[in-house]
Structure formats: C-alpha cells, structure tokens
Amino acid sequence: MGTRPKEINGFIFACTNSTQNECFERLLFGNAKPNGAVAIRVKQGDFLFLLNLEADLLYGIFRATTEGKLNIVPEAWSGNYPYQVRVEPIGKIVPLLNAKRLLKEMGLSRNSIMGKNATQKLADYFKTENSLDSWKTVSEESSNEIEIAKPREWSHFGKAKDVSTDVEEMPILQATTMWDFPRQSYGKTPKGNNKYAGVTPAELIWNLVWRYTEPNDLVVDPMCGSGTTIDVCNEEKRRVIGYDISPTRPDIIKSDARKLPLPDDTKAKLVFIDSPYGDNIKYNNEPANIGNISSENELFYDELKKVMDESFRILDYGGVIGWLIGDQWVKKKFTPVGFKIYQKLLEAGFETLDIICINRRGQYSHTAPWFNRTRRFNFYLRGFKYLFIMRKPDGHVKKEMEERKVSWAYYERNKDGKNKRKDN
Ligand SMILES: C[S@@+](CC[C@H](N)C(=O)[O-])C[C@H]1O[C@@H](n2cnc3c(N)ncnc32)[C@H](O)[C@@H]1O
C-alpha cells in the first residue's frame, strides 16, 4: 500500500498548444514563477488537471507522483516553467471542452488550491467506465501509456455546484508600485499575530519572498515582532531566521538587530525589516528597543543605520533588503521618517531597486471624528508607508545596469481618448 497524504488537494496546471506535448511526453507539469507558490504546494498523491489555454480543454485526471519542486527537469520547456511536479494519469486521459467556462462557473482557477470537495466535484466530470474511483488508492491499474479519450462536453453533466468555499486563493504578485492589502493575512493559517501592534501585512512579505528568493533560500528578519516573516517563509519553503529584542514566541531568537549572531558568510538572499517608526508604539520594556527613541531625534536614525549595516553584512551579493517605514506628524510637526531612512540605506551601501507605496490600513485614527479634525485643523493623517526595496550591489549586475540603453515608446491620445503608439 502506498502512503497517501491525509488531506488530498487538487491543482490546475496550464499549457498551450506548443507546450502540451512536453507535458504528456515527460509526464511533468510546470508553472512559471507567478504561479510557483501554487506548484510548490502540491503533495504526492494530490489530484491534478491540465488546462490547455488555447484549445480551452481541461485534461484529467492526473495524480502527483512527486511533491511540487523547483527544476525537477531544468531543461523542460527551455527552462520557462521551472516549478514542476511529476504526474501519472489515472486511467484514460479525458479532455473536457469549454474548460474555462466550467472553471469559472465552479469558481476555480490556476491560482487556487482545491480542497477535497472541490477536487472531487471536478474529478466527477472525468469519470468514464475505465477511470478509477478517484478516492481509492491508485496503483497497478493506472496506466503510464497515454490514451486520450474522446472529448467530453461538461455541460452534459448538469450545472456545477458551488464548491468555491472549498478553494484557497493564493496571493498574487503585485504589478505596480502601489500595494494595498485589505487583510493582514491570507490562506488558511494565520501569519504572525494580527493583534500585535505594528504587525506587517503577510502578503507584502509574500510578494518580496516570491520576487527575490527561490525555495530553500535564506530569509532573515532582524526585528520580526509577532513572526509574520517566519510563517510566510515556512509556507513558501524558504529557510528563515527571525530575531527580536523581545521575542513573542519560541521560534524567534532574542537578539539586538544591531548585532546579529550570524557569520559574515551567511549569504541571506532577503532581509525584511518592518522597524519601529519612532516611539509611537510601545512594543516592550527592553532598554535596547529602538522603538523607545523618537523619530524627531537623530539618534533614532543612527541606531537604525547600525541595523542596516548588519543587514548588509549578512546579505549575499545581489541580495535584497525590504524596509517598511512610515512618516510622522505629531503635535503639528511633520517628520519625513521615510526620506531619512532612505538616505541612511543609501549610506549603508544599498542601491535602489524600487520604492513601493503601501496603503496604510487598520489605523486607529482612520475614523470619522479624526477625518473631521484633519479638515478643521488643516492637517493630514498618514495614508501610506514606504517600502524601500534595495540591493547589496553585485559587480556583475551593476555592469549590466551601466551598459543598458533605454528606448521609449511614445503614445499620443486619440480623439476617442485612447492611447495610440506613435512610431518615431
Ligand atoms: C513593527 S514591529 C515588527 C512587526 C513584525 N514584522 C510583525 O509582523 O509582527 C518592530 C519590532 O522591532 C523590534 N525591535 C525594536 N528594537 C529592536 C532591536 N534593537 N533589535 C531587535 N528588534 C527590535 C520590536 O520589539 C518590534 O517587535
């Protein structure tokens, strides 16, 4: 008897007419990085489906024979879909027509993880005389010879039942420099503690993790508060170390972020820091808590510069730091905390990859009485934070930047208000 994981999930991988054959020949499905987080969640024994986006066909049913991993076959699809899983067909492969409509009606997508009910419901559409009962152990009878059955029109099977509650939506990679996360966390398990004052939105960290690291890379959070970075990294299969001056849970190591107990050759790929923004939040009674120092005091920036130097030291060349910080306006005095921190990051030797604007949600002051006060007394509440994304320079990358040449495409606005590319 093969060992079956307790909880079976279902996943939809995608292909096109030109990539489909390689999926079948290699018995391998693959995702590019934007859906990498979905692929690495596949466990051996999970049920998989293959959506041909161009032909609008959904092939099934397959079973994962490995867990989802990076580069099982590095050369497959010329390296374009490196988050991969090995599969075997369960009985005949049946293609369903009008697949996109079916998936839409069921509330399923490539970015979702189907629980047992949703998987069973989708699997039901593929049942043929010689397909097996999907929930029994599939072994001898499952054929490695791929025989594609006649396409089936799913609408013969009646209307899809609502299984959307049995689906877990994954976060997406942000496309612009304006990020807004309505909830602190995502998924079925909590990330950090949403009651912790100053807790970071988990999706923000998820975005940095997927943009700048690969599974098994090392991520360090020197001021990790309630442990959001640790929880995100554990789920995304990154190695992670979290420190705080006042640990809130056993997997956080007590340390001063100005002096981390890590050797020079640590080679972290990502450091994430959501530092205190001044003394606006009382985190703890530790004398070394930098959150005891006002952001109106230069000492605050000098102490955080030490944290930046430590981060620089433990990062690999080309490694990335994400630093989240907000400005301060208190008692009629504005302090550009963000600009000052950015200046210090440059002084520490980091080069800028980008600056992101984070919508500041969940503020106690974001209520009607405060909004009225801003108008009567002519000031503003803080509406955003900065996320500075910087890199420890890497000689090779720098050369590439110097050699690059930019050629802009120019657009002119038509009478109908649409943009039209202008060829010069
Ligand atoms: C904004 S909170 C971090 C929130 C965290 N990212 C989360 O999601 O829960 C800032 C943290 O910095 C920590 N801190 C302040 N001074 C520190 C120091 N010298 N070394 C390490 N951590 C420090 C505080 O204890 C606090 O937990």
Image (cartoon, grey):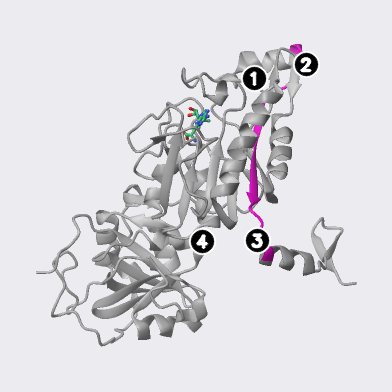
Q: Name the N-terminal-most of marks 4 and 1.
A: 4
Which residue is located at x 28 percent, y 87 percent?
147
What's the mark number on residue 394?
3
| Residue holding disc 1 | 294
Tell me which amino acid carries mark 2: Asn
Position of 341 with respect to 166 (left or right) is right
Residue range in magenta is 376-395
SS under mark 1? loop
Tell me which amino acid carries mark 4: Pro
The span from disc 4 to disc 2 (Cα, nearest Å) is: 43 Å
The span from disc 4 to disc 1 (Cα, nearest Å) is: 40 Å
Depicted 107 relative to depicted 345: above or below:
below
Which residue is the extreme one toward the left? 1
Q: Name the N-terminal-most of marks 3 and 2.
A: 2
Residue 12 horizontal/vertical position (percent): 38, 65
Q: Quadrant of residue 327?
A: top right
Residue 342 horizontal/vertical position (percent): 71, 39
The span from disc 3 to disc 4 (Cα, nearest Å) is: 25 Å
| Residue holding disc 4 | 34
Which residue is the extreme one toward the right? 424
Depicted 211 relative to depicted 289: above or below:
below
Q: Is mark 2 within 8 Å of ligand 1?
A: no
Q: Quadrant of residue 138?
A: bottom left
> What is the crowding at mark 2: few (fewer than 14 residues within 10 Å), some, or many (at least 20)?
few
Residue 69 visible in the current orientation = yes
Residue 135 horizontal/vertical position (percent): 17, 64
